[in-house]
Each structure stands twice: as C-alpha cells, then as structure tokens.
Image: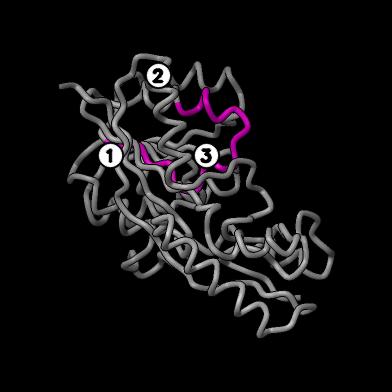
Amino acid sequence: MKLSTTGNAERNLLYIPKNIKKLEEKKYSLGRELLKDGIPRGTTYFIAAERIKNESKVLEVGCSYGYFGKQLKNLKQVNIVGIDIDRKALAEAKKTGAYDTLLEMNLESFQSLYELKNRYYESFDTILCLDVLEHIRNINELFLTLISLLKPKGELIVSIPNIGHLDIIYNLLIGRFNYSLLGILDNTHLRFFTEDSFRDWIQIISEDNELNLQVELIGQTFSDRIELSGELDDNLQEYVIKKLISMSKKVNNKNLFVVQNLFSVRRYNG
C-alpha cells in the first residue's frame, strides 16, 4: 500500500490495518529525526524559528518529545513552556533540559483552558501552535485562550495544512478523499483550511470579540506530488491535471502546490 506525506493515500486510512500499525506509531517521532542535527531550511520549524527573538518567553503548544524546543533553546536562549497531552512524550521532553516548565494538559478540556489563562494571562512573546489546531474540536475556545496568553505585542505562530492543494482538488473530482498517516489528510485531522478561509475565520473571531487581530502569511511549504488513480488512464489524468492548473491561474489561485501555510496572528495596537 502506498502512503502519502502530501495528500491522499492509495486507500482510505481513516482505519489503520494491522499490517501498518507500526508505521502509525512511528509518525510521532518523525520530527525528532528531522531536527536531531538542527532545523532544516524550508521547513515549518525553520520559518517559525526565524520569527523568535533571543531570550524571549515562548509557549510551545504540542511540544511532543521536545525536539523543537531543544533547538530553540540552543539557538535563541528562550525561556520556554511546553504543553502536551502525551505523558511519555513529556518525559522525553524533560530529558532535553530545554523547558523551564512542562505541562500535561488536554486542550479539549475547558477546565484546562481556564487554568492556562489564569496562570499565563498576557505572559508570552511568542506562542507556537504548529500542526495543532487542525486536530482540535473546540478550536474557537483554544484560539481565544491562546490570544489571551500573548503579551500586548506578542505573536501567535500557526501552521495549518492547505486543503486547497491540487492533490485534494483532483482526487475530489474523481471521487476520492482518502485519509493518510501524514500530510494534509492525516487521519487525526478534524479541521481543514485554505489560506483565505483561515484568514476569514480569524477575522470573524476578531470582529465578534473586538480583538483587532492582524493576520500575516509568513511562509509556506510545497509539494507537487499528486496521488493518481490506478483505475483511470494515465493520459486522461495528466490532461485533467493540466486543465486544473490552467483554471487555477485564471482565478489567480497561487496555492495549488502549498502543503502548509504559516501565519502570524497579532493584536493591532495602533
């Protein structure tokens, strides 16, 4: 079975068969392998790290095994707080020595969000929310809580998969929406955004809560991989894909090959 790190898998992996269970377990350690020798250019981690100031106070939401926090501590000497739901991952993060505080917390819990706000209201220069929001049911409540934890001139950095990638568009056209172990259609994703729909979501929250938020696109990652059907003629599929690319240019869609959008969200203070 072919797996994808971009969009559709060959088959719908919303259910994981026994023969690839071990692969699923390994996916949470991929970031550790990626970052063991530094932060590679062109990754979401590199783009986010470039935004962080030396010796600033940082909250890393979904810190996992601490691989990114360790690199940030070495590069920027930050004061960093990490949050994760995985106790085993937090134990490994503690071993890095990078974190000033580590919290085991379920961000789906309103009680946890209340405690977080009480403890860290307007405390952070930067909040990192990389590959997190798309997994959250109570996404609005979490977002509002995170905004409240920023200092007046603080910045929330968010990475979000792009559901408008050509792989998704093409496969919808032929009737497929196959979850994968990784990528845009990671089988744990609950929320889906394009660049514009993310901006619109933030704007509605900002207007309704009088937050005066500013959203800036600060980076993107790319892939031209498309999962083709084994049941359709290759020449036909190539023709349809070329047509989709041509049509996207006519409507000024520049995000067909974007896998991840990275945004900065700040309060505008005039």
User: Looking at the image, do the residues carrying marks 2 and 3 touch, with CB atoms under 8 Å apart?
Assistant: no
Dot placed on the residue nearer the N-terminal end, 3 or 1: 1
Mark number, residue 79: 1
Q: Amino acid at mark 1?
A: Asn
Quadrant where the image shows the N terminus: bottom right
Mark number, residue 203: none
Farthest left residue?
Answer: 270
Above or below, 233 relative to 260 = below
Percent position of residue 100, x then y: 35, 38
Q: Closest to the observer: 158 or 196?
A: 196
Colouring: one colour
Above or below, 84 relative to 233 = above
Dot placed on the residue nearer the N-terminal end, 2 or 3: 2
Tell how many labels.
3
Question: Position of 89 compared to 82: left or right?
Answer: right
Quadrant where the image shows the C terminus: top left
How far is mark 2 from mark 3, CA to CA? 21 Å
Percent position of residue 4, x then y: 63, 69
Give the residue drawn at x 53%, y 60%. 165
Give the residue drawn at x 35%, y 44%. 263
Q: Secondary structure at mark 1?
A: strand
Dot placed on the residue nearer the N-terminal end, 2 or 1: 1
Q: Secondary structure at mark 2?
A: helix
Question: Position of 190 compared to 202: left or right?
Answer: right
How far is mark 2 from mark 1, CA to CA? 16 Å
Q: Which residues are magenta?
A: 126-143
Label 3 sits on residue: 133
Label 2 sits on residue: 119
